[in-house]
Amino acid sequence: RKEVEQDPGPFNVPEGATVAFNCTYSNSASQSFFWYRQDCRKEPKLLMSVYSSGNEDGRFTAQLNRASQYISLLIRDSKLSDSATYLCVVNGDDKIIFGKGTRLHILP
Amino acid sequence: EPEVTQTPSHQVTQMGQEVILRCVPISNHLYFYWYRQILGQKVEFLVSFYNNEISEKSEIFDDQFSVERPDGSNFTLKIRSTKLEDSAMYFCASSTRDTTEKLFFGSGTQLSVL
């Protein structure tokens, strides 16, 4: 099983819709989880950390399911500017591991 | 907002040449990282650095690679003899704590090996 696995997409979603993606991880000892956003040929930027109790930041909600070893990201009322690649990031064995990312295209 | 800065933004080199990629992490950060991303592929961990030594490295980080913190502000990645497959975007990152803490990335150096 890959360390961090994501559906690569692309997800093509109309503006205003809600979209969700998951990410699974293999190391049950992982302690920290993050969602980063990466625009084309740019550096990854932190979108939000993912806490055990789940957390929300405006239109974005992140959840962690330790039993099933996955994290999720929900985007409500999607905007054109949400078009990007969303990277699932997990720490494990003293290094931070990135998923391959899920590409999201918001359609006007 | 403080940021991680990387220079140069683009580097073109001939196969077999040495390159040094430079980074200035955020000043109060203690943990430093190099990642690379080959075009169209995922961000891959290369090395982490803390307290003036390597704390973790990946299998990609072989003897051709080295890192240094030559002074209090710079953090460099050296590739001794570049190969074609070293062509990638190289990102430097830093954080205040260990891997439980979020990373701040520089804007990257695009390395092209011809």
Image: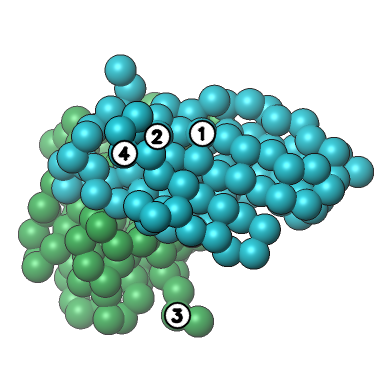
Residue B17: percent from left, percent from top: 32, 40
In this rendering, the answer to whether B21 lies above or below B94 is: above
Read off the residue under disc 1: A22
- B66 relative position to B11: left or right: left
Q: CA distance from mark 2 to mark 4?
A: 7 Å
Judge by depth and name the residue closer to the eye, A39 or A76. A76
Residue B85: percent from left, percent from top: 39, 27
Read off the residue under disc 4: A66
Q: CA distance from mark 1 to mark 4?
A: 13 Å
Labels 4, 3: one chain = no
Q: Residue at x 40, y 30 (%)?
A: A24
Crowding around mark 2 (Cα neighbors within 10 Å: few <14, some 14 to 19, many 20+) is: some
- A56 relative position to B100: left or right: right
- Give chain B's shade: green
Q: Which chain is cyan?
A: A
Judge by depth and name the residue closer to the eye, A91 or B47. A91
Amino acid found under the numbered disc labelled 2: Tyr
Read off the residue under disc 3: B2
Q: CA distance from mark 1 to mark 3?
A: 31 Å
Labels 3, 2: one chain = no
